[in-house]
Amino acid sequence: MSHAPSAGSPVRFSLLGGLAMFSLCLAASSLAVSAESGPEIIDLIPQAMQVLTGRRLNEAGRATRFLESFIAANPQVYQRPQLWQFNQKTALDYIEKVRDYETAIEDLHRRFQREEPLVLDKFCRAFPDFAPARTRIYLMLSLFRFDAKVPSDHPDSLLLGLDGLARFHGSNPPLAVMLSHEFFHLYHFQVNPLPRNPDEIPLYRLLWQEGLAVYVSRQLNPGASLADALLDPKLATESPGTLTDEAKRLLRCLDSQDDEVAAHFLAKGEGGTGPGRVGYLIGYDIVARLAAKKPVSNLARLRDPGLRFTFRRELNQLIQAGGMM
């Protein structure tokens, strides 16, 4: 899951494209921890915080150091103009804003170190065919562009933007729920690989992927509410009332590969208005109906033409039922 951009942003790239290229070699200053059975963890947070909190420098000096000693030093993550445009002004703006989140970022960093092994163990027991050793996790700053995402160009990599987590979800987000969600994406793309060109992914598959991940994250964390799993209290409480109308709209554009259409279902509306991210809720409802009859591991392997037929059938049933199950 990713904190989606506004409707005017290039949603298909933002939700799926992610970072197009990752260097196989790590920055010398980053911390890489490999375990035989676990993911490789590339931890850029200590380096980032050291630069950002360099009190001996004024803000202009920190901005220069941030650009030269952190951004330029980690091209495997930040050499991506579609996501970031770096200059002195953008660095200064970010340094000013991120000051309010430094404590939360450090808290999330400690929480990840405590919680990730437990979440991963639970996930692997639920999905024993998952191969976490084939994955890597980047602990990083997204410069407030996203909270977490698995980019389609590297579906074996999870990007965790701790600054995005803190800004979009507060100082105490449901981290275990979020990690379960993202681990499922990594698993899903292992057992059911994405097409090479993310522009070829139709809208219904985007919603299917998110619906599965939302459902699994809630199942693996029994105390989690629907709002926790959707990471959006407004979506959980207000959107079910409009679900039938949105499902009818979706039925007319299931095969769309248009960014603006995807934005309607997967991105937050401008200014937080509109049905933002209602596609997550539709996908979750469809998966919940199917998971009552089939194991999720089987659903994860569903491919076209069966996937499209199943999604369309269940969407019609949702419309006929007048809303969520």
Image (cartoon, grey):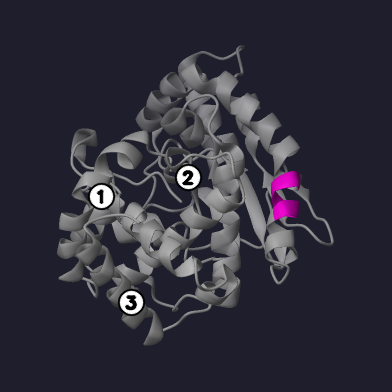
Residue 11 lies left or right of residue 156; in this view the side is left
Q: Sequence order check: which comes first, mark 3 or mark 2? A: 3
Say whether marks 3 and 1 touch (CB < 8 Å). Answer: no
Residue receiving disc 3: 200
The mark lying in front, picked from 2 and 1, is: 2
Residue receiving disc 1: 9
Residue receiving disc 2: 229
The amino acid beneath tag 2 is Ala
The residue at 26%/38% (across/down) is 238
The extreme right residue here reads 36
Say whether marks 3 and 2 touch (CB < 8 Å). Answer: no
Element class at badge 1: loop
Q: Sequence order check: which comes first, mark 3 or mark 1? A: 1
Which stretch appears magenta?
118-122
Q: How crowded is mark 1: few (under 14 residues within 10 Å), some or many (20 or more)?
A: some
The amino acid beneath tag 1 is Ser
Q: Sequence order check: which comes first, mark 2 or mark 1? A: 1
Q: Position of residue 102 (x, y in %)?
A: 56, 21
Q: Where is residue 265 in the image (x, y as percent from the top left)?
A: 26, 55
Separation of residues labelled 2 and 1 (CA atoms): 24 Å
